[in-house]
Amino acid sequence: MRHAPRLALPLLIAPLLTAPPLATAQPVEIYGRMNASVDFLDTDGNGEALNLSSNNSRIGFRGDHYFEAHDLTLLWQAETTLRIDNQGGEWIDRDTFVGARGDWGLVRFGKFNTPLKNLRGQVDFFADQVGDARNVLRNRIAGPEGQGPIGWDERFRNGIAYRTPVWHGVTGDLHYATRLDGNGTSTSDTNAWSASVSWQGSRTYVAVAHEQQQYVAAIPAGDPGAGLLTDDQYRRKATRVAGWQDIGPLRLAALYQYADNPDDKAYGGGARYTLDERWALKTQVYRLDADDDDLRADLYAVGVDYTLARNMLFYFSYAWIDNEDAATLRPYVQGRTTGGGGELATVPGGSPAGLSLGGSYRF
């Protein structure tokens, strides 16, 4: 009897050692992309020169924790832009969120891409390069006082998003933002939402997305009650339909966008032809059909991709924009650190162009 406690202790411990864990935490993953290019940019009116650009380079940290008893995965991500050319900028300025995933779908809270933006990324053959379709589609304009420039292809701050499980290739996304700047809000009149439905098969993708951004202007600084919200509302809406189709080594893609305030249409598409496992040729054309004829613009882009390895791509891109008399769009602004400043602005009605040689390494 004196030896019973010694025998009981291993018997009590054994089930704990052999029982399946109730929760499993994965190591933190470090990931990212280094994407830089050497560009010759011609403003068509304000000079031309050689430039270096960092093209949406980023580093991120993410992880998840699986709770077996509840078949639930908690997940998180923090991502920031890397400016290879000149450093600087905000810390943690890209998709950053916490969330949960189960057989019921995915929910996230934080700051990250909207469904409208993700749809464009599916069909843009020159994303983060000279010729990026956002140079025509984004259409950023000055918002109400205190809001700054606003446009499409943004990340919602203060976002709450839900994604459905995939059902026969169909996925739904709904994204709501309580407010688009870094502040809180005392009224639901200041908000935004974006939603999409997509279907993807083995060789086909089609989707539709709609987004609305709504603001209430603030009383200007220096006036009584400065900073408080007024009754002046400002609302923008946009709808996109897009898709791609694979035909052997050829992928064809197209997108149509209708927006209001201001009313305009933008549409276009492209093609990417894979020559072999390393080389591919690509082109795309997009038009901004603005409400004012003098603000219309056409974007043209041609390029070559060379895949050195699964995570290493070299690319050559050439793009230009033909602006109508009052338009000043440029083909080298979006998705890049170089090209958006006043020193590379074009003249009204100009035809600015960019020639780019770059590389992208994913880790």
Image (cartoon, helix red, strand yellow):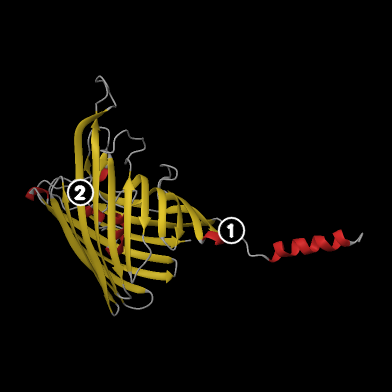
Image marks 1 and 2: residues in contact by CB distance under 8 Å: no
Dot 2 falls on a residue whose secondary structure is strand
The residue positioned 20% from the left and 39% from the top of the image is: 234
Q: Where residue 131 appears, x then y in whole percent?
A: 26, 58
Q: Quadrant of residue 301?
A: bottom left
The residue positioned 25% from the left and 19% from the top of the image is: 224
Q: Is residue 230 above or below residue 324?
A: above
Is residue 235 in sight in this rendering? Answer: yes
**Residue that extends furthest to the front in the rendered view of this protein:** 1
Dot 1 falls on a residue whose secondary structure is strand
The residue positioned 32% from the left and 54% from the top of the image is: 174
Q: Is residue 26 left or right of residue 259?
A: right
Q: Where residue 333 appears, x then y in whole percent?
A: 27, 50
Amino acid at the residue labelled 1: Ala
Disc 1 crowd rating (10 Å Cα; few below 14, some 14-19, many 20+) is: some
Q: Which mark is residue 23?
A: 1
Q: Quadrant of residue 215?
A: top left
Q: Where residue 339 appears, x then y in whole percent?
A: 29, 48
Q: Is residue 46 above or below residue 288?
A: above
Q: Which residue was labeled with disc 2?
A: 237
**Residue that extends furthest to the right in the rendered view of this protein:** 2
- Between 271 and 291, the residue placed more toward the observer is 291
Q: Where residue 117 appears, x then y in whole percent?
A: 29, 55
Q: Quadrant of residue 147?
A: top left
Amino acid at the residue labelled 2: Lys
Disc 2 crowd rating (10 Å Cα; few below 14, some 14-19, many 20+) is: many
Q: Is residue 234 above or below residue 204?
A: above
